[in-house]
Every structure is written in C-alpha cells, then in structure tokens.
Image (tube, helix red, strand yellow):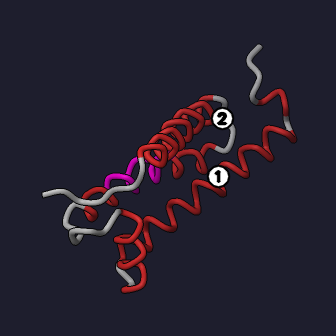
Amino acid sequence: MYWETLPNWFWVIYYLFLVTTFGTAIFSIIKMNMKSWSIAAIAFTVTVPIISLIKSIGRAEGMNEYEHFVSHLQQGSVWTIFALTGYVYLFVWWALFFLKSKANPQATCSE
C-alpha cells in the first residue's frame, strides 16, 4: 500500500531545521545563554516530530502529511495544537537566539 508523501526537499529542510535547532540549543545551554528557553526548544525538537510521526501513520490513503495535519487541526485534535505550538515556539526561539547573538556578539564566539 502506497501513501502520498511530501517531496524529498521538504524532508531535507525539515530535518536539517530540527538537527540545527537541537545542536544550537545544546550550544546555548553550554554557554549559559537562554538556558530555560533552550531546554524547552530541545523538548519540542524531540517530541513534536515523534508525536507527528506516530499520529500520521494512520492517515487516509491519498493524503500527505500536511493535508493530514491540516485536517486534524480543523477538527481540533490536541496533537496538532501541540505540534503547531511547538513549531511556532521553535521559530520564536530562533528569532530570540539571533537577537541575543546580535546584542551580545561575544556570547556566540569561542575564545
């Protein structure tokens, strides 16, 4: 049985985003920069893809992951609200990370 899926370039960007976020959050914890924000970013980076994968396994034939996500979001499924919150948090975390690194350029440079 074959299901539709999103294109490969999307998955490359998605997992690259997650791996980069995970690594940058660990770096931020080590540098004691935004420690609690970084711990939450790590938690979302790990849990959101796992929950999304588990909940997407039983999707209807002919639906890709995005269509399945939007369909369940319209129905008010808790897992989609959690995933959407997690993705928004990760983008906000990146914005804060960049703002903080521009405000304090020595925080991201190793000596």
Residue 92, placed above or below residue 61? above
- Front disc: 1 or 2: 1
Residue 80 in the image: x percent, y percent? 40, 71
Q: Quadrant of residue 58?
A: bottom left
Query: Which amino acid, by three-letter code, is at mark 1?
Result: Trp
For residue 97: magenta?
Answer: no
Residue at image location 40% in from the left, 47% down from the top: 46
**Identity of the residue drawn at 36% across and 86% down:** 75
Graded by Cα atoms within 10 Å as few (under 14), some (14 to 19) or many (20 or more), the crowding at tag 2 reads few
Would you call the spot at circle 1 few (<14 residues within 10 Å), some (14-19), or many (20 or more)? Answer: some
Query: Range of the magenta residues?
Result: 42-50
Residue at the right extreme of this rendering: 103
Q: Say if 75 sits above or below 39 in the image.
A: below
- Does residue 98 lie above or below 84 as drawn? above
- The structure residue drawn at horizontal position 58% and vertical position 45%, both measured from the top left corner, is 38
User: Most prominent secondary structure in the magenta stretch?
Assistant: helix
Give the number of the disc on residue 93. 1
Q: Is residue 83 left or right of residue 27?
A: left
Can you give x and y, in whole percent of width and height, for residue 76 in the image? Answer: 39, 84
Task: Please tell me which of labels 1 and 2 falls first in the chain.
Answer: 2
* Relative side of 86 to 3, left or right: right
From the image, tell me which residue sits under label 2.
32
**Does 13 appear above or below 77?**
above
Q: Quadrant of the C terminus?
A: top right
